Image (spheres, helix red, strand yellow):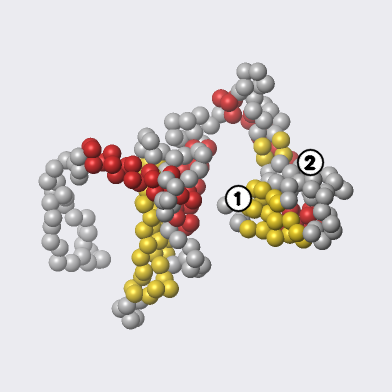
Amino acid sequence: MRPRLIKGLRREGVDSIIPIDYVRPRACSEKTAALMQQMLSLVVNGDHGTARSLKNPYVKLAGKTGTCYIVDPKTRQYNTSLKRLAFCGYFPADNPKYSCIVLTFHPRQEAFGAATTSGVVLRETAIGMYARGMLDNSSDYHADVDPDNGPTQPIIYASAGPELRNAVKSATGVNPRQMGSDVKPDSGVPNVRGMGLREALNVIEGARYEVTFSGSGHVKTQNPPAGTQLPEGSTVHLTLSE
């Protein structure tokens, strides 16, 4: 776009939309655009990208993280304890349909970065759209029917109630398997995969084991595995999905 010098913008009574005068129809050549797309994809899908934690098996994302400090209006200096975290990206990376910019203002936990705040919002948005068949994909379970064994059995969390089970069965025609529902007493470490943390704590502590955990959400893995025979009072570590 052709540069334009602006003296100032006023909030009230003035339309702040600035007319645009294009110098040329493209910002860069197709070759340069292809290189940029590759670089933005590696940010998420590469081995050393700053947003590699956003990689998921459903929607391939591409984008870039950004972090800056906020100026304290009182001191007119940068406040290093307050961050503005951004993620600008698009999806699906191989066939872009949607772009999005997410901004997060000074999260309460300083350890958070742009990928784990703004990036997660974009990732969950993309996965939600994928789940609804909005990315030129099918959200119908029947599309995954195995010709030899019949429809793939849906999986729901152990903490899901009978209403959800019935809804899934009604939608798919297949009775879902409930993760963690095969807990058996006196058979070593209980199987709590798929349970929420509170439910998993009740089950494992009821079996007289100690519990440590990391992450948030539902139980993704447990160590030692279910069925392991341990002395009473031993510790079981749970890793929760994000």
Of pointers 2 and 1, the one earlier in the residue sequence = 2
Which x, y percent locates residue 129? 48, 40
**Residue lying at the far right of the rendered structure:** 186
Residue 241 tag number: 1
Q: Amino acid at mark 1?
A: Ser
Would you call the spot at circle 1 few (<14 residues within 10 Å), some (14-19), or many (20 or more)?
some
Residue sitting farthest toward the top: 148
SS at badge 2: loop
Q: Is residue 164 visible?
A: no
Q: Specify the amino acid type for callout 2.
A: Asp
Image quadrant in which you'd find residue 25: top left
Residue in the foreground of this view, choosing between 5 and 54: 54
Residue drawn at x 51%, y 67% as measured from the top left: 109
Q: Residue at x 46, y 49 (%)?
A: 52
Question: Which residue is pictured at 79% across the width and 53% down the height?
Answer: 203
Q: Secondary structure at mark 1?
A: loop
Residue 31 location, quadrant: top left
